[in-house]
Amino acid sequence: MRNFIQYVIGGLGFGGIYALAALGLVLIHKTSGVVNFAFGAMATVTTLVLWSLLVHAGLAFAVAWLVAVVCAAGIGALTEVVLLRRVERSPVLVQIVLTLGLLILIEGLAGTIWGYAPKSIPQVVPGNPVSVASFLITPNDL
């Protein structure tokens, strides 16, 4: 039972990330009318930009995060203006094929630029885990 509760505590942090991703998908669909299957790949590229700025450029987390958000906004705006506006009145199948093609393109470019090896963002909030009723909660989970 103890392990189960510990997994639930850790899973809530990951669940929050998944909820934010789902909210992003819904927001894009409601504003543009297009289901963007490339949204996950765009989020991945933003994360890889953040990783590059932290690991290779040595920027502070707040600065790197702001630059990554600006890059994400730029990628999203470019995608909206160049691609999605042109298909918003097209049949749904055309929209799906376009965004799936964009997904494949972005994933291929990301793999070419950053490689396929797993990467890890350095710990954002330093410190030791907090013990609450014999369960450990990391500062990042908080």
Image: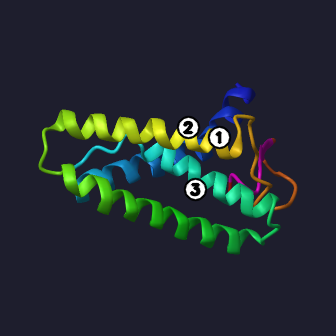
Q: Which of the two labelled residues, at mark 3 and mark 2, occupies the earlier sequence position?
A: 3
Question: Which residue does the numbered mark 3 point to in the structure image?
Answer: 46
Q: Amino acid at mark 2?
A: Gly
| Most foreground residue, 9 or 126 | 126
Q: How is the image coloured?
A: rainbow
Q: Quadrant location of the C terminus?
A: bottom right
- In the image, the segment drawn in magenta is 135-141
Q: Is residue 125 above or below residue 95?
A: below
Report helix, strand or loop for mark 1.
helix
Q: Quadrant location of the N terminus?
A: top right
Neighbourhood count class around disc 1 (C-alpha, 10 Å): few under 14, some 14–19, many 20 upward: few
Q: Amino acid at mark 1?
A: Thr
Q: Is residue 137 on the magenta stretch?
A: yes
User: Is the C-beta separation of discs 3 and 2 under 8 Å?
Assistant: no
Report helix, strand or loop for mark 2.
helix
Report helix, strand or loop for mark 3.
helix
Which mark, residue 78? none
Q: Which x, y percent locates residue 69?
A: 55, 67
Question: Which residue does the numbered mark 1 point to in the structure image?
Answer: 112
User: Is the C-beta separation of discs 1 and 2 under 8 Å?
Assistant: yes
In this view, the mark in front (3 or 1): 1
Question: Which residue does the numbered mark 2 point to in the structure image?
Answer: 108
Neighbourhood count class around disc 2 (C-alpha, 10 Å): few under 14, some 14–19, many 20 upward: some
| Left or right placement of residue 130 versus residue 109 in this view | right
Q: CA distance from mark 1 to mark 2?
A: 6 Å
Q: Is residue 81 above or below residue 17?
A: below
Query: Residue at the location (23% across, 57% down)?
Result: 85
User: From this viewpoint, which residue is outermost toward the right?
Assistant: 128
